[in-house]
Every structure is written in structure tokens, then in C-alpha cells.
Image (cartoon, rainbow, N blue to C red):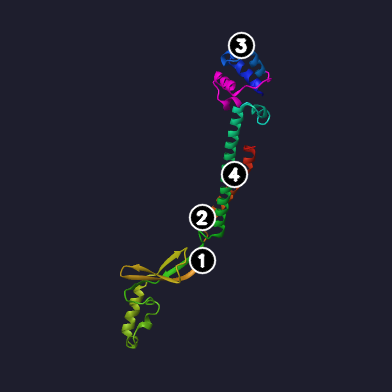
Amino acid sequence: MTLGRKLKSLRTEHELSQPELAEKIGIEQSYLSKLENDKSLPSNEVLRKVLDAFNLSLSAFLKDFELGKEHGALRQIPIIDEYFSEQGKLKFAQQRVYLITSSLIIVLAVTLFYMGYSKQVFTETQFQYESQGVIFEGEPDVIFSRWMTLLSPNELADRTFMANKKLEIALRVDEQMISLFEYAGQSFKQKQQGGHRHFVLKREKQIKRPINAWLQVLGVFLFTFGIMGFVIEKRFFK
């Protein structure tokens, strides 16, 4: 569509004759005829009067013109040239934001996938610590495993005392296991009422954690989404 055809189409749509429209705009009918036949281009002032006459915004007036075909001629009108320049800047800014967003999504996708694959954030190595019971204040940490080495020769020679002591230790045994995903050293202490527990590392084992698999799945999804953003951008901002 050309500018002249657009003017004629609007005039017909509003059921106005050339003399009526020319009078409404405030120009000669002969000038309007030249405009409708694309033999002349309106000035900024005339174009504004045309837009006022049909109660149109500049963007609504230009929506039927094909990009690249008629824009070259239309840009000879200063107000339209300025409009297209502003639209070009806005489009460039939108395109830049779109590309940056797609790039950030891809970076996030790779990061999430690596987190799940490497298992560094959510480790799958489980450390199991064991405690044999509560150790009272003043007692050594090896009271349950080496209690006999802490006795005097006379106590060791006393069978009754040894039997009672063995029973006492046996009754105090209250094994407790703690599993941690963070290494807490070869041993650590945990306060308890009346004393503390001494936890010793017994074994390490590998435990599969669903969150790592989900991170990889989410990473693949976001990576695909980000790549699709670049593909769509070429068509959307063409």
C-alpha cells in the first residue's frame, strides 16, 4: 500500500468526497488529488491534519505499510522518518535484551547441569559416624573400647570387681549412628545430658540423590529453551 492509496482508503471508509476531506484538512482539492495519486508527499503539518481528521495515531496510520517497500518513500516526510528512527532504536534495545536474556538462560542451564553432574554442591558421598554411648564427665573417649586398660592391677585381679565393671559398661552401651553428607573429621563430640558422645567415622558410602538428576534435567531444558530463543530471535526481529 502507498501513502496515496491509504489516504483514498480512509476517505472512502469515512464516506467523504475529495472536496469534503480537502476542506476538513484545510488544503486545496487539487493538492489532495496529487496526494492520493502519489504525485506529491504531505508536509509534517498536513500529515498531522490528516491524522486529526481521521482520529488516528501515527503508528495506526502506518501499520498497513509493508516494511522496506514503502518506508523508503515515506521517510522523506520528517515526522515519519523520526518515528521510524525511534522504532528502530526501540527494536534494537528489545533485541539486545532478548539476546542477553537468552544468553543468561544458557549460562544458567550449563551451571545447573554441571552442578548435578559433578555432584559438588549436593554430594553423594555419605559419611557414617558411630557412637557407643554417653561418656560421663571426666571419662576418656575410649571408655567403651579400652576400659580394661584404664584399671589398676588390683582392680584387674579382683574378679568380682571385673564382673561388675563389665556389666556396668555393657549396660551403658547405647550405639547411635549418624549419617552426614559433609565430612566432620575422623571423629567429633556431641554434648549430651550428663556428658557427651564421641562419634567416630566408620565408613563412607555413595548415595544417589534425586536432586542431582533433576538439576541435569533442568539444565538440559533451560539450555534448549535458550537456544530456541536465538532461533526465534532471528525470525521475530527480522
Position of 40 relative to 190 (above/below): above
Q: CA distance from mark 1 to mark 2?
A: 18 Å
Nearer-the-camera pick, 14 or 160: 14
Of the two numbered discs 1 and 2 in the rendering, the one whose residue sits closer to the viewer = 2
Sequence-earlier tag: 1 or 4: 4
Q: Is residue 95 visible?
A: yes
- Callout 3: helix, strand or loop? helix
Sequence-earlier tag: 1 or 2: 1
Which residue position is annotated with label 3? 19
Where the C terminus falls, by quadrant?
top right
Q: Residue at x 60, y 18 (%)?
A: 10
Look at the image and say whether residue 40 sits in the magenta stretch: yes
Q: CA distance from mark 4 to mark 2?
A: 29 Å
Which residue position is annotated with label 2? 211
Mark 1: which amino acid?
Lys
| Residue extent of the magenta highlight | 37-62
Q: Give coordinates of residue 103: x percent, y percent.
A: 58, 48
Mark 2: which amino acid?
Ile
Asked if disc 1 and disc 2 are in contact, CB closer than 8 Å, the reply is no
Nearer-the-camera pick, 162 or 150: 150
Which residue position is annotated with label 4? 99
